[in-house]
């Protein structure tokens, strides 16, 4: 059953710990806690990305006279680009989690429909699988990789 929460009326206490909340799973305060956590994480990633673009990538001179210096600069540049790509993918997952909050499916395992534990969501707020489903998925992945 989809549920939606209005961010205008929900206040999250500063000392709120969703793991200690004995109320209904994904009640309005809990949803707002996770919404704020996801938005703060996304803002931090975007800020870091902007900082990298301005301070690192724009100032990187890859055409160095010394071949070793050039190789090191190119390696650093490639590593930075890979890091930014991983962060871009993470931002997409954060946005998807925010959409799940809005449509009322946040905290439900995509595979089983069961609740994902609040402790797991607090540690990994973009989680889409319960711990058991994630472990099953990883075992299957390992089995297929070994073939």
Image: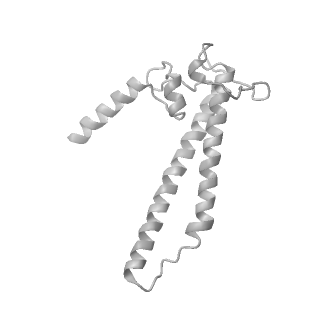
In the rendered view of the protein, which quadrant contains the C terminus?
top left
Residue 48, quarter of the rendered image? bottom right
Viewer-closest of 115 and 147: 115
Q: Residue furthest front?
A: 15
What number of labels is visible?
0
Colour pattern:
one colour
Residue drawn at 44 percent across, 86 percent down: 65
Q: Position of residue 105 (x, y in %)?
A: 58, 25
Residue 24 image position (x, y, % from top left): 62, 13
Query: Residue 6 appears at what percent x and percent y?
Result: 75, 26
Image quarter hosting the N terminus: top right
Write down the quadrant of residue 111 in the picture.
top left
Q: Identify the residue at image location x=29%, y=32%.
A: 140
Horizontally, is 116 left or right of 2 in the view?
Answer: left
Residue found at x 56% / y 44%: 92
Residue visible at 46% across and 82% down? 64
Q: Is residue 141 above or below residue 106?
A: below
Q: Is residue 19 above or below residue 126?
A: above
Give the residue furthest to the top: 23
Decide: is 114 above or below 82.
above
Percent across and percent down for residue 144 are: 25, 38
Q: Residue lying farthest bottom?
A: 65
The residue nearer to you, when weighing 102 against 48, is: 48
Would you place residue 117 above or below residue 36 in this image? Answer: above
Q: Nearer the viewer, residue 79 or 16?
A: 16
Residue at far right of view: 8
């Amino acid at each position: 059953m989809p549920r939606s929460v209005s961010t205008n009326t929900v206040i999250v206490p500063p000392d709120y710990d969703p793991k200690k909340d004995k109320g209904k799973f994904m009640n309005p305060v809990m949803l707002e806690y996770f919404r704020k956590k996801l938005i703060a994480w996304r803002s931090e990633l975007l800020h870091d990305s902007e900082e990298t673009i301005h301070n690192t990538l724009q100032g990187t001179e890859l055409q160095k006279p010394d071949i070793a210096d050039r190789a090191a600069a190119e390696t650093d540049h490639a590593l930075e680009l890979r890091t930014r790509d991983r962060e871009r993918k993470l931002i997409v997952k954060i946005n998807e989690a925010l959409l799940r909050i809005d449509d009322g499916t946040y905290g439900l395992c995509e595979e089983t429909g069961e609740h994902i534990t609040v402790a797991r969501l607090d540690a990994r707020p973009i989680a889409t699988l319960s711990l058991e489903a994630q472990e099953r998925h990883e075992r299957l992945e390992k089995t297929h990789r070994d073939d």
